[in-house]
Image (spheres, rainbow, N blue to C red):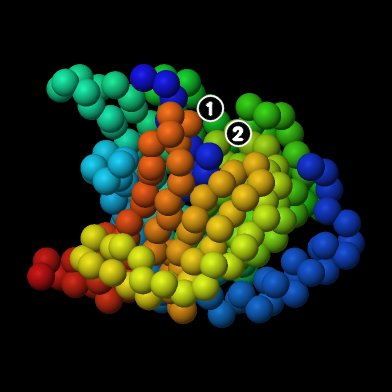
Amino acid sequence: MRRLILPVLLFCGWLGQGAWAMEQSAARADKAFDPLAVYGPTASYDILRNGEPVGSHRIEFTRSGDILAVESRSDIEVRLLFLSAYSFSYVAQSHWQDGQLLTLEAKTDDDGERSVVRVAPANDGLIAAGPSGESPITPLHPLSEHWWQRFIAGEEQLNTITGAVNRIDVEPLGSAYVPMAAGIAPAARFRIDGDIQLETWYDDAGRWLGMRFLARDGSTIEYRCRACRAEMASLAGDGR
């Protein structure tokens, strides 16, 4: 099967002083965002292809002192006639302090094609290195992950599969009810165009509720929240 994934996942040149000042302002505004308070220790999503389940996406949050550790994991398998026709796995581990990225390592296996993207300190900022080469970024540079709504607030995202800096254009689509594993939920919808194209959804607390996009083979891929609210995570943890 042709490689399906992913114009996203979960997604050049050094930013000028003006952009840096804007990022610092955004970081101060977002300091109140605490993913552990918003999601709980885990957030999980079902992945569907043309309406049929093909995988899962899970995000884990842990804190040690003032360091936030985030692990994002996706696993996809498309089967045809009881055989595996396509597989995809993605694991990213990142560390944050005061809303700023410290380090990241993302490993992808796209149907046998493997890649690694790493972000590490360099000079006064960070260097992202991956299959697309190296790019200097700031500690506030948005990533192509989705758990923080700030990641769609700018015009660029670091693609954590390729290591490239993607150009994006974000258009608010207004409010609507979006599908979840347990029903529907009100959300703010955003269309992202540019180097990646998708529609993504957040609730009024900044929780990521899911997204939808077209894969390279023309199929529709959708991520739906299974347990992405703190209270839902608590109930799941209690076994109720």
Residue at 15% in and 70% down = 238
Residue 97: tell me if it is visible. Answer: no
Q: Is residue 51 left or right of residue 99?
A: left
Picture quarter containing residue 96? bottom right
Q: Is residue 81 above or below residue 165?
A: above
Residue 174: tell me if it is visible. Answer: yes
Q: Which label belongs to residue 64?
A: none
| Residue that carries the numbered disc 1 in the rendered image | 115
Q: Position of residue 237 (x, y in %)?
A: 19, 66
Q: Position of residue 130 (x, y in %)?
A: 64, 31
Asked if the residue under mark 2 is in contact with the one under mark 1, i.e. CB atoms within 8 Å, the reply is yes
Residue at 29% in and 63% down = 180
Between the residue at mark 1 and the residue at mark 2, the CA separation in whole angstroms equals: 7 Å
Q: Is residue 109 above or below residue 31?
A: above
Q: Position of residue 123 (x, y in %)?
A: 82, 47
On-image quarter of the C terminus: bottom left
| Residue that carries the numbered disc 2 in the rendered image | 162
> In the image, what residue type sits under mark 1?
Ser
Q: Which is nearer the N-term, disc 1 or disc 2? A: 1
Q: Which type of secondary structure does the marked residue at label 2 adopt?
A: loop
